[in-house]
Amino acid sequence: MSTSRSNRVKAAIGTVSLTGAAMGFLAACGTGEDEQEARTVYCVDEQDRVVDEEQCEEAERNGGYVGGLPFFFLLGGFGGNRYSVGQTIPQQYTGAATRINPSDSSARSRNGMPSSGRVSSGTRISGGIGSGGGGGGS
């Protein structure tokens, strides 16, 4: 009887351990924080053309504008493509991207970016609440 009880206890412990491991795995998968879902940020003008990050740094100090023109951080997936200064990001990616006014420190923080300072174009961002599309403080 003690061998039978011992085997049942071992089986129960094994089941609990596997269940806990599976739940931990599923919880980690459900966060959307894995490396493949990390988002990339670019400093862009109103035509979604990548500009030097100094434009967004200056726009941060001037309410989102430089010389009367708006600049944004564009945060999205971009299909794994990398864009350089002067290239326009295709509309197929910009529609689902999040636009952030560089001077909106709370929107920056919510989206996993530093609340102030320079953010280099092409930087991968993970975390933040606003991982979906939408305005995010533009």
Image (cartoon, rainbow, N blue to C red):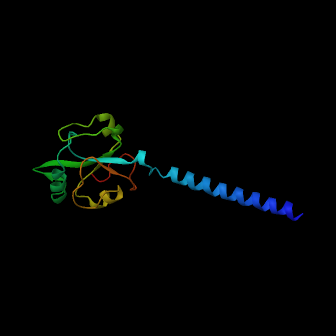
Position of residue 80 measured from the top left corner of the image (x, y, whole percent): 35, 39
Count the marks.
Answer: 0
| Vertical order, 37 against 104 (above or below) | above
Residue 98 can be seen in this image: no
Q: Where on the picture, by quarter, is residue 6?
A: bottom right
Taking the view exactly as shown, the residue that stands out farthest to the left is 67
**Residue shown at 52% from the left, 53% from the top:** 28
Viewer-closest of 95 and 31? 31
Residue 9 coordinates in the image, percent (x, y): 78, 62
Residue 108: image x %, image y %?
Answer: 30, 57
- Residue visible at 76% across and 57% down in the picture: 11
* Quadrant position of residue 77: top left
Residue 36 in which image quadrant: top left
Residue 84 in view:
yes
Of 63 and 73, nearer the camera is 73
Q: Position of residue 132 (x, y in %)?
A: 40, 47
Name the foreground residue: 107 vs 116: 116
**4 sits to left or right of 101:** right
Q: Who is closer to the viewer here, 131 or 126? A: 126
Question: Which quadrant of the rendered structure holds the N terminus?
Answer: bottom right
Residue sticking out furthest to the bottom: 2
Position of 129 with respect to 88 (left or right) is right
Residue, x 37% and y 45% (percent of image)? 133
**In this view, which residue lies farthest toward the front?**
3
Identify which residue is drawn at 15% across, 55% down. Answer: 58
